[in-house]
Image: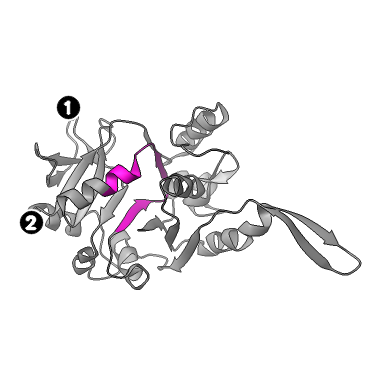
Amino acid sequence: MKVVLLAGGYGTRISEESQYKPKPMVEIGGKPILWHIMKRYAHYGYNEFIICAGYKQDVIKQYFFDYYLHNADVRFDLATNEMTVLNSHAEPWKVTVVDTGLDTMTGGRVKRIQPYVGEEPFMLTYGDGVCDIDLNALEAFHREHGKIVTMSSYNVGQQFGVLDVDENGLVTGFREKSENDGSVINIGYMVCDPRIFDYLPGDDTVFERAPLETLAKQGELISRRHEGFWKCMDTVRDMRQLEALWAGGKAPWKAWQD
């Protein structure tokens, strides 16, 4: 199953970093947060990625172009101008970076990568949030329920808009947060059936609005509640909190061995 990563936005709320690079390329522990997300997926056996790039997409392309060299021991023979790779630590990943446009909305970005996904289910998430979700269990949940979209949900209190979810996990609607809200939000880490592309008409489609709202009304959107760790790197403060967890050896999203 392929993994689609939304990595094309401007990242204006973390502009101190995103003025130089896309937000998913902001580093935690010397590695882009996008890399951390991909490592989590790879730990569960998902090694084929499609990155929906946009803003400063050249930075993402250059990173993966140089990845093999930067993760290998090399010998340079200056007399003959030859380079020998002695030991590579590169990942067994296949990475497709797609320029999905500078101002394309999230649904439009997903629509643009349809040819690269084909007629099969795929994982979908945002390029700025890490978690400790069991991704194999998420896929199994999606296949068991057979809905067009399965999304991971999380209770973070007052910061975001919320979902209405029934006792069976079906999402019945979206609404703005209220004064005393304790409802759950969409944190990405979704699984999508290829039928989702029928709900994405063009570049101006916001994935989280009309498509998901329509699916909710049709009973084709289901939520899987996540009770563990999730953190979105929305601001510099968030970045520093994630950096502190990583530096202290307490990063909950790190499931792989060095």
- Per the image, label 1 sits on a secondary structure element best described as loop
* 114 relative to 217 in the view: left or right: right
Tag 2: residue type?
Answer: Gln
User: What stretch of residues is rendered in magenta?
Assistant: 122-139
Q: Is residue 105 above or below residue 30?
A: below
Quick check: marks 2 and 1 in contact, CB under 8 Å?
no
- Per the image, label 2 sits on a secondary structure element best described as loop
* 102 relative to 140 in the view: left or right: right
* 189 relative to 253 in the view: left or right: left
Closest to the camera, between mark 2 and mark 1, is 2
Q: Is residue 122 above or below residue 39?
A: below
Q: Is residue 207 above or below residue 229?
A: below
Circle 1 Cα neighbour tier, 10 Å, few/some/many (<14 / 14–19 / ≥20):
few
Residue where numbered disc 1 is placed: 180
Front-lying residue, 149 or 21: 149
- Residue drawn 31% across and 70% down? 118
Can you tell which quarter of the image residue 21 is in?
A: bottom right
Q: Does any portion of residue 161 appear in the rendered image? A: no
Residue where numbered disc 2 is placed: 218
Can you tell which quarter of the image residue 28 is in?
A: top right
- Residue drawn 26% across and 59% down? 206
Q: Tell me if residue 129 is in the magenta stretch.
A: yes
Q: Work out which quarter of the rendered image holds the C terminus and state it.
A: top right
Q: Position of residue 152 (x, y in %)?
A: 26, 43
Tag 1: residue type?
Answer: Asn
